[in-house]
Image: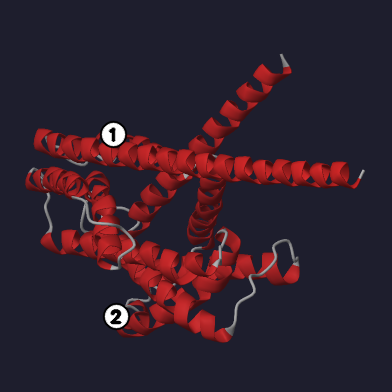
Amino acid sequence: MSMSEGVVKKVILSYTYVAVWIFLSFTVIVYNKYILDRKMYNWPYPISLTMIHMAFCSSVAFLIVRVFKLVEPVSMSRELYIKSVVPIGALYSLSLWFSNSVYIYLSVSFIQMLKALMPVAVYSIGVLFKKESFKSETMANMVSISVGVAIAAYGEAKFDAWGVTLQLLAVSFEATRLVLIQILLNSKGISLNPITSLYYIAPCCLVFLSIPWMIMEYPYLKETSSFHFDFVIFGTNSFCAFALNLAVFLLVGKTSALTMNVAGVVKDWLLIAFSWSVIKDTVTPINLIGYGLAFLGVGYYNHSKLQALKASEAQKKAQQADEEAGRLLQEREGETTTGGKHENQN
């Protein structure tokens, strides 16, 4: 009975982590759209919004790591920080800047459709950096996802070429960042949780973003007197962005990255439905057909990754079993030899 209760508790917790992540991710996307869209809150300054997020996350992470000492910092030399964290921080700042900028030009539903290209970008860049092996079957899968997204783009009622370009750049920079994390950090045995990740990377992002901000947004904010800081709006928005980082850690840490991918698909469909029904964005049948095709491609890709992971784990277990059997055999042979020597002595 206790075993079944434990299983039920584990399932309930897993669904809770999924629900919290979907809620926070959904909230951050819609909240950012509300702030940046000219027809809503009308504060079209994506670099400023991203800098506010990074300043908030840096401050909270510093308090947790250095003041309250609730999380241990990672042992990292200055050279490693410059060679590894700084490039990752630069890519992260570009990814956040461009992905937030997109909300000014494109609908929430179309943005989610374009984000289906993330596996294509991650795989392609992984092959380029030799972190993934080229397989014709996988590449065909990537082409099917791309075709689906292209059909969705063709059917978009309010297509904006600049907005699409920004989203594609955001996906490219984010995919490159994910691959570089594997190359520059994970390969060296360095693993960052959301708190230590924000502690090291968020200040770096803040510095990188300050350069284009001074050139592109600060003059406009100064001229239009829009530099008024709404603590309620930006405070709650930043808190949601910070909470989302923790939710990602809980979801991946307590379940798996695959669970997050599946939950991401559910979130995308919910956002498309919300964008169509509440925000009143136009979603055409061609949009849905294209995204449906891309969705099937992403689903097949996730299934293939899961099967490969299971095969790898099974191979590791078999190898461990063989090593254990070999060790036991050596011990028995040693005991037999020792026993034979004792008999001869007697």
Quadrant the N terminus occupies: top right
Front one among 279 and 69? 69
Q: Nearer the viewer, mark 2 or mark 1?
A: 1
In percent of the image, x 92 and y 43: which residue is there?
A: 346
Disc with the residue nearer the chain's start (2 vs 1) = 2
How many residues crowd mark 1 within 10 Å: few (<14), some (14–19), many (20+)? some
What percent of the width, then of the height, locates residue 100? Answer: 33, 61
- The residue singled out by tag 2 in the image is 216
Horizontally, is 267 left or right of 236 in the view?
left
- Secondary structure category for the residue under label 2: helix
What percent of the width, then of the height, locates residue 182? Answer: 43, 64
Q: Are marks 2 and 1 in contact (CB under 8 Å)?
A: no
- The residue singled out by tag 1 in the image is 273
Front one among 252 and 94? 252
- Secondary structure category for the residue under label 1: helix
In percent of the image, x 30 and y 65: which residue is there?
A: 130
- Asked if 304 appears above or below 190 in the picture, the reply is above
| Colour scheme of the picture | secondary structure
Front one among 335 and 229? 335
| Residue 22 visible, this orientation | no
What percent of the width, then of the height, locates residue 136? Answer: 16, 49
| Residue 85 visible, this orientation | yes
- Asked if 28 appears above or below 267 in the picture, the reply is below
